[in-house]
Amino acid sequence: MIRVGIIGQGLVATHFAVGLEKLKNNEIPDHGVPLRNWLPYKYTDIEIVASYDVDESKIGRTVFDIALRDYPGNNIPGSLRDIVIRRGIHLNSMKGLPIKARGREEDKDLQQALLELIDEWKSMKIDVFINVMTTEPVEPIGRLGNLEKRVAEGDVTASQAYAYAVGLYCEKVRSAAFVNAIPSPIANDPAFIEYYRQKKGVVFGDDGSTGATPLTADLLEHMYERNRRVLDIAQFNIGGNTDFLALNLPERNIMKKKTKSGIVEDILGYEAPNYIRPTGYLEPLGDKKFVAMIIEYLSFGEFKDELYIVARINDSPALAGLLVDLVRLGKIALDRETYGTVYEVNAFYMKKPGPPGFKAVSKYYAYTKLLEWAGVKDPRF
Amino acid sequence: MIRVGIIGQGLVATHFAVGLEKLKNNEIPDHGVPLRNWLPYKYTDIEIVASYDVDESKIGRTVFDIALRDYPGNNIPGSLRDIVIRRGIHLNSMKGLPIKARGREEDKDLQQALLELIDEWKSMKIDVFINVMTTEPVEPIGRLGNLEKRVAEGDVTASQAYAYAVGLYCEKVRSAAFVNAIPSPIANDPAFIEYYRQKKGVVFGDDGSTGATPLTADLLEHMYERNRRVLDIAQFNIGGNTDFLALNLPERNIMKKKTKSGIVEDILGYEAPNYIRPTGYLEPLGDKKFVAMIIEYLSFGEFKDELYIVARINDSPALAGLLVDLVRLGKIALDRETYGTVYEVNAFYMKKPGPPGFKAVSKYYAYTKLLEWAGVKDPRF
Amino acid sequence: MIRVGIIGQGLVATHFAVGLEKLKNNEIPDHGVPLRNWLPYKYTDIEIVASYDVDESKIGRTVFDIALRDYPGNNIPGSLRDIVIRRGIHLNSMKGLPIKARGREEDKDLQQALLELIDEWKSMKIDVFINVMTTEPVEPIGRLGNLEKRVAEGDVTASQAYAYAVGLYCEKVRSAAFVNAIPSPIANDPAFIEYYRQKKGVVFGDDGSTGATPLTADLLEHMYERNRRVLDIAQFNIGGNTDFLALNLPERNIMKKKTKSGIVEDILGYEAPNYIRPTGYLEPLGDKKFVAMIIEYLSFGEFKDELYIVARINDSPALAGLLVDLVRLGKIALDRETYGTVYEVNAFYMKKPGPPGFKAVSKYYAYTKLLEWAGVKDPRF
Amino acid sequence: MIRVGIIGQGLVATHFAVGLEKLKNNEIPDHGVPLRNWLPYKYTDIEIVASYDVDESKIGRTVFDIALRDYPGNNIPGSLRDIVIRRGIHLNSMKGLPIKARGREEDKDLQQALLELIDEWKSMKIDVFINVMTTEPVEPIGRLGNLEKRVAEGDVTASQAYAYAVGLYCEKVRSAAFVNAIPSPIANDPAFIEYYRQKKGVVFGDDGSTGATPLTADLLEHMYERNRRVLDIAQFNIGGNTDFLALNLPERNIMKKKTKSGIVEDILGYEAPNYIRPTGYLEPLGDKKFVAMIIEYLSFGEFKDELYIVARINDSPALAGLLVDLVRLGKIALDRETYGTVYEVNAFYMKKPGPPGFKAVSKYYAYTKLLEWAGVKDPRF
């Protein structure tokens, strides 16, 4: 059994919760779950036991209620009635967004709030936490020595506060995994990597790799393998969900730009000029974003070819499907006592795979390495 | 030194000849040559010593003349003045096309024409033949026992006749490689594979993998690795070069359809409905074809995503760049006495990799295997 | 009141029937109905009173039943239970399609079958017939003098037989309009135009203009108005409905090619090379076809620009929306005693507007002329 | 004869100068010139007599020199050697751009600089000025009463200063036309419209309508005429010329947003959510910008269709071709003594047609009205 706690009951978490229950009930096939039924843990081994949010319209209601309201499908599994959304840590993470939010730390001291959470987690025996809150502006802590002080001063973001608390929980209660699926640098923060190693916890991250970015990585690999010279790449994204709304705020957009443009040089071996970032918010597009891309390259004899890609991608389901793997891989890492972070997992599932210092690789290579790490054999070969 | 004979001085051969000389002169970078300078043989080791065609407007003229007329660039290397285009085997391979063609076999017996060719090749000490003639309608011979009889009766196509003659040359004169870059099944014909093994020759094929087909293969791999359920794929191609003109003739189009649609099931593991074939001829597009593609798939929770690809690809340079590798790999196979065909080479460079019976794999996997076979280390890792 | 008879209860007719009833019930807005509520006849004035088909799985069932089975939406209006689908004329119009079909003429003489139909229409007082059967291979009759003889010999297609019978009905019973929304040349057949004029009937046609063709016409107009030189146009269409299945049969595809490629020269004033035709059948696309287009043109100074269009278009609803206008315009023409055909109506609504001899115009011009003919003022101006 | 003065010898002006001379020499066809040879003034009637810029690398050199350096083609007409680029007004219009610029006003008083310019123009007998300087941040003057004071205080932009000086020139020397092809509100500024009316001058503007915006206008008209409900529109633009570099500066980008998004509501009759603006700068794209667009709409029965457009458009030639018309139309307006601004001209050629208060119309309608105003008959009809 893998007991899961959700941090941020937004659309991704709702797709994860609904999809997982349907999977467990055999109501849907496991499309979008890369490692499907190849892992020792099955879908039925996963149980969501807690959910945290700071949106006043969600706190106190059940995941079932939220799914009824937000999920773009029907047949919401009744089992989601058992998960009541609790008040989480805010630390201004929703600032600037049109959402009425209030965090548990606002009535008391942050430290005290975190200890309270740890107590809750202990009672629920949580194994894996998944962080899917809205993108927040944040810088890495850097040195582990600064972490305690920063928390004491309240000079951390919500994600950092949770990551810190989960570490304490690992130390005091039980080893656990923290899956950071948002851009905040956690698995790329040397402070947190060392912190989890010491606390005997696992951290995966950062920024779940869905949509256009992994596709771009693999297209670049395709170019590299033919020795085509990439002249330029532009990639536009526009969508209508809360994440695009948040990214429309300049200080948050910069978070995405950081996670996205590193791949070009690492895969190609040279710095092809590029413009890769989320571009705008357009409400009627909803969760099904519009992606447009151009790649220009030189072929043999310096003839120029052009590749244009247009895609419509359901944003939240794509990430939710990866979470079904990440939760299981988190538990496997715990079973193996592989503390700190795991590059082989991050490289496939994350846009900015930790730890820092590793080069980006195409997802094809990452997939091969992931299967090796997971001890899985591709049935095609 | 690798001595090369060209079969079919069309646009691909002209791009190959011009580009190769420019490469040797350091006038252009080696874009579009996958194995770049990683192989033991360098670009300067390659020398084109012969060229065959049946188009009366080419025979007797030099590759330089043809390049001046047909190559869409300038600075044609003067060294191409040394290669005079000779009359080759026709066997009606240009039937239906608006080209005045006459083959060497038309004045005499086919057998005699082939022996004449072998004598020429002997004097020029050819190591590698590249077959880049226009797509021809053809069925495999099947059993080696039938090959002699079919040739004796003249019941072969031009490609088959050349492949047969090169085999005799291997036996009588010296081991050589036959690179079949067109759709005719040679490396997929059990008769020819066995024939080359016995004659101590090498055959690579079939149908050089450029443009949209390898891209489709890699996109399908991308889908597979995320366990996305591909619902349908359509891929259109239209261009204005002779190959599109030929493919517009129904009996030739069927050749392409055969080589292209096998990849879907092999890579995905199930038969996704697809419509993949060259679609039409539109003269002003010239050699820069227009490709349009749709891939629809189900993501987690059965949400449908759509991927649209539009590309403009210079057809002939793409294949010409691969030939720079294939010629060198052909020589390496000869050096290693690896007779018959070599799946590891075909899998990356060919749309329909021989020998028959092997499953299609994505080009990513093929690339890894190719590097291993070639003894090359990817400098990124 | 406008009493309507449907010929061919396929997907278009089903969308028309369902949509019309929902419109009358104010359940949906009138999107896709170009002349919206600007005409003297309102949606509630239209009543479908009869439907004919030859598909054994439809005959005897109600339009409600068929909508339940085939309509990709819910809330099928109960009023459709009143329309029972009757056996129509077959004349091999479904040949080659995987549908069990049998026509009324197969048990008796064609003439007798037609007289029987006229009797039915008389009892139902039909004003407007809409022909939305599957595309059939057919040539125009040409001279009116041949029409009687061709019918007597059974040497007509199903559409021609219906068009003939409606003419007789006009003469014997009451003036009526025949809206030919399929490619068969009726409003482009001099025989039928004269026939309707003599019989005091109205014929609109041919081939309802939805999807990519009117868009192409308007894009060409856009090019013309900037004096851009169009170098080439390619347009691909692929879909999964019965019409695409039928068009996949070569003898039917030729029908579409005829209606589509005339527009280029008429609008641009010169013959730009083009490849415009339905391309294939891919079942999972269903009624939502995939269109891909390229237009290349020269700008000032002979610089080349490229325009690529990818579209997903629900095929049947687009035509069904036009029918809501055409039925009303047919009645208006009858009220005005404008017998024969009406170019101003055809020019906007049809791909091949009758009568023959008129040049194609862009849909923008056609729209202006249509509003004038209909006596409607654009509220924007 | 029409004597033309250029303001801003950037890429557009260079394309205009080179293309015009080639046109006059019959070296190129007149593609991209909407009114071609239909006007009473011929191409040979146009003579460029002056050019102004503030880029130190251009001042003192000839248009020929600049064309040799910047024009992406060859055969630069020798007649351009006669036009020496003079120092113009800067007023910080190049601020933030990586260009060394210095204006004539920097050594003296602005008023004095303007009087100097008027003297030069007088000696050259200029009839038409075309303003094609880089996009500048600017607000309209508003009331004519403020214009003098603003100029006296130097509180105007370069475009406003030029527009003011041309007005004085009209009054003191001869009537002239000012074609404002950049986004600065001149023909949309009540102050300038009234000013030109009083001074007996003509002003056309604002923001030459090339590329994606007029195409969007016509696509929206296409939607309107079918009563399709547009749900959303997003349009991205990225390019590598100086204008994109300038627009990348936030205060300049806002200028474009203003001129572009008004069209949606005016044409459709309702405010469809949209995201239409230049998006970024990517140097290797050069002058051939990449445009990506999505339009989603509801068809009959509320079925959703999607239209995706990808285009590659040579930015500067498109505008240069329009200038060949605008110069001639400016002279025609002067001949007719139609002072102030001319909506019929602006509506077709400009993104933000003056005067303010007029609704945007599709370019199709604007074209019809333009032909009427110009007294031209479309030869197709």
Image (cartoon, coloured by chain):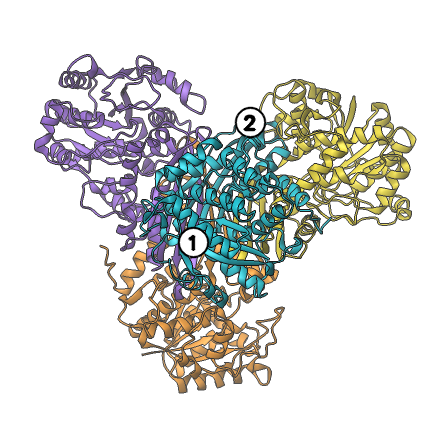
Chain colours: A orange, B purple, C cyan, D yellow
Nearer-the-camera pick, B337 or A98: A98
Q: Give the residue pinned by disc 2.
A: C270
Mark 1 nearby-residue class (10 Å; few <14, some 14–19, many ≥20): many
Q: Is residue D173 above or below residue C99?
A: above
What count of labels does the image hold? Answer: 2
Disc nearer the start of the sequence (2/1)? 1
Q: CA distance from mark 2 to mark 1?
A: 43 Å
Q: Nearer the viewer, mark 2 or mark 1?
A: 1
Q: Amino acid at mark 2?
A: Tyr
Q: Is residue D286 visible?
A: no
Question: Could you tell me residue A98's position as x and y percent?
Answer: 62, 70
Q: Is residue D345 left or right of residue B190?
A: right
Q: Amino acid at mark 1?
A: Tyr
Question: Could you tell me residue C234's position as x and y percent?
Answer: 47, 36
| Residue at left offset 30%, top offset 42% | B260
Secondary element type, mark 1: strand
Residue lying farthest to the left in this orientation: B145
Q: Which mark is residue C52?
A: 1
Q: Is residue A189 above or below residue D85?
A: below
| Residue at left offset 50%, top offset 53% | C122
Q: Is residue C256 visible?
A: yes
Mark 2 nearby-residue class (10 Å; few <14, some 14–19, many ≥20): few
Question: Could you tell me residue C332's position as x and y percent?
Answer: 63, 48
Q: Which mark is residue B65?
A: none
Q: Chain of mark 2?
A: C
Q: Chain of mark 1?
A: C
